[in-house]
Amino acid sequence: MKKPNKSKSLNQERIVEKKGGLEYNDFMTLLFVVAFLVIDFFPYFQSYEIIKPQFLYLTVLNLLVGLYVYFDSSLHSTTLVSIFKKSYLFKIYLAFIFLSALSIFGAKNISLGIVSITEMLVVLAMFLNFALLFYNRMHLIYKVAFLVGICAFFQSFTALYHFVEIANSKSISDALASNFLKGNTGNINIFSASLMFKIPFIFIGIVHYANWKKWFLAIALTLATTSIFLISARASLLSLIILTLIFFIYYLKTNSIKISSSIKLIYIILPIVVSIGIVNAIFKQSKLGGRFTSTTERLSQINTGDASANRRLIFWKSCIEMIKKSPIAGIGLGNFRVESIPLDLSTNDTVPLHAHNDFLELTAETGILNGLLYALIFVAIFFINLKRIIKAKENEARNIAFLTLMLLIVYGIDSIFNFPFYRPTMQLCFCFLLAFTFVNVPARTENKIESKAKVYLALVVFSMIPLYYTYYAYKTSNLEYLIQTDNINFEMKGVLNGDSVINQKPKIPNVFQSSESFVEYAGIYYLREKKYDKAIKYLDSANLINPYLGRPDFYKYLIAIETGKMDSAYVYIKSAFYRRPVNDNFFEKAIGLAISKRDTIEILNMYNTFSTHIKKSKIWEKTLVSLQASGYSKTNLDRFMQQGIKDFPKDSVVNQKINSISITNHIIEGQSLFAAGKHEKALQAYNEGLKIDRTNVYVLQNIGFYYYNLGKTGQAIPYLIKAISLPGLNDGKTEYFLGICLSTNGNKESACKYFNTSKTKGYPDAQGQLNINCK
């Protein structure tokens, strides 16, 4: 393709475009757009998360775009530079980035802040490059829309193809639970949002094109909306409804109502209706319920208190607590994933890596002022583009402003319910809407500034700055992938060892995506290798990096157990529990050692701490057993059981355990009273136990022995017969005494049968009775 003459006027360039030719810079712009969209198909390259290789790729791509702009003086524009200098929106954005960077100096984990600010700089460079590429080239918007539609087509087609494969080979339920409905974006909500930001482009492409491209985009819309409805992410569903409604209103308002106009809208309505029908049929056949109900029912769950909504509320409350504690500087950019852990003790299954609300999370991390600046960016974008829709003279300018507003709706709703700020695929959406806001101005000719201007060289240098950090962040993610593949938490050895982890010890970031520190895993490797001193050294370092999970102290407890230091083991496991006081495993290990020390005070303290955050009947049960085994007084034990009834009034586990202990107490009391010669009171105690459970084998057995010891063998027989008819008695003792009772009452044939059973079960005296009574 021949590069055009630099002196060609803007009008001449547009004539070439209208005749169907593609000017060189137009071609390069579209090529770079494709290159940016490629991140949605980017391989993991043995990284644990796709984010790190994506940001590394974007850094390299920004550098290439910067070099392209720098060496092509036809792209240098004094007007564009002036637009940025005068823009209050750009100043707000730069101030937001500056304050975000400033917050890192007060962060507990600086490495997380460095990674986050690096990613923000990558996005800033990407936005500037988008603005440079699209300035005076907004006539390419429909070609861009078609390219975005192609991307959406292949994204959704790939996911749906694998979905159908699993549904055919296994079941629809397995297909819905598969990972293919998240593409390579990390999770289903991000994948759904990634498709959603492409929907506005598809809409404008469908109503613009009149040839085969319209049909292709309609097919892409069908596949994309089918994927979105299958995922049933409520933020995306809400966005899709709002976008569709406002697009119809805008289109009908700006176009005369004719049959031709209505037909164009059918290409949007029909794909959405078809996809709803397909998805509802799939959901009906799967019978899974929950998020996989009909589309209308899923939407009705937006205001309900389901588990997902409740978790988000907990995350948001954690943010508010952080904001209250540090309203000015925040906790430090990127530090939410660590500092939120002690504030969310509602479950031990997960920790809140993100707040699922970018506005709250960024406010908590960087302070109230910066949070307001971030929100102000969206407000400014909204009013700038709304003003253009109302006042712009050119239809193209109005349409692009409307497209930008649709992108703002997608990104804004996702920001309220998820975390697009930290996802490269959604940062593309952010850069599109920012760039379109800046460059959607009347095209103009101008005198070019000097070739290779310093401002464009500065952009090249700026694009290079994140390269070091994005590369090492990717290397860190690669190490996380290798460690997770080793599964060293449970396996005794892996491909890596302690030394290899330390030699690669990452500083940027210094924690896993799950917030566990890398040195913690070095300690675990050394533990497996029996290098206990090194293990303890790095486990102690891990506690300094993330002191809230308790895992380093748990592994120190294992070391103490292996080396026979039981007192140290008790100290370490208690420390692990109090760092993460909702961890069932830590609790059970701690009370296990507390029993050996008869430390009932500590058992109660741990239980009360646990139940302050989560009330679990199984934890209550284990605590009761531990207290009983530790010699807790009967009075205090009764008080603890009454508290259990109050806390878990309808829980069968609690009721069964209380009944079991009560019955045991009645049996022990009856045995003590009988030994003291208080026979009537002993029988009363046994009968109290029988009232609780008339099928309790041990009560029946003891009543039978009670009558036997009093010489009332006839009265003992029915109790002993009923006792052996129930499970639980396996030593042959009951059959032996039942045989004696039957023999005493003249029923030797039945007696011999039970003596034989008693012998089979290994009761030692049974053979003697067989020799005497059963020759």
Image: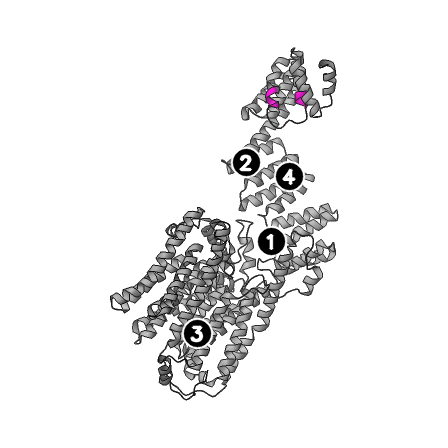
Point out which mark residue 600 bears. 4
Q: Earlier in the sequence, mark 2 or mark 1?
A: 1
Q: Whole-Å distance between the Cαs marked 2 and 1?
A: 29 Å
Q: Is residue 155 left or right of residue 774?
A: left
| Left or right, residue 656 beside residue 197 | right
The residue stretch that appears in magenta: 721-736
The span from disc 1 to disc 4 (Cα, nearest Å) is 25 Å
Q: Position of residue 592 (x, y in %)?
A: 66, 41
Query: Disc 2 residue type?
Result: Val
Q: Is residue 560 visible?
A: yes
Q: Earlier in the sequence, mark 4 or mark 2?
A: 4
- Residue where numbered disc 2 is placed: 653
Amino acid on which the number 3 mark rests in the picture: Phe
Chain-order first, disc 1 or disc 4: 1
Residue 446 placement: quadrant: bottom left
Local packing at callout 1 (Cα closer than 10 Å; few below 14, some 14-19, many 20+) is many
- SS class of the residue under badge 2? helix
201 or 407, nearer to the observer: 201
Residue receiving disc 3: 90
Confirm or deny contact between disc 3 and disc 4 (CB under 8 A).
no
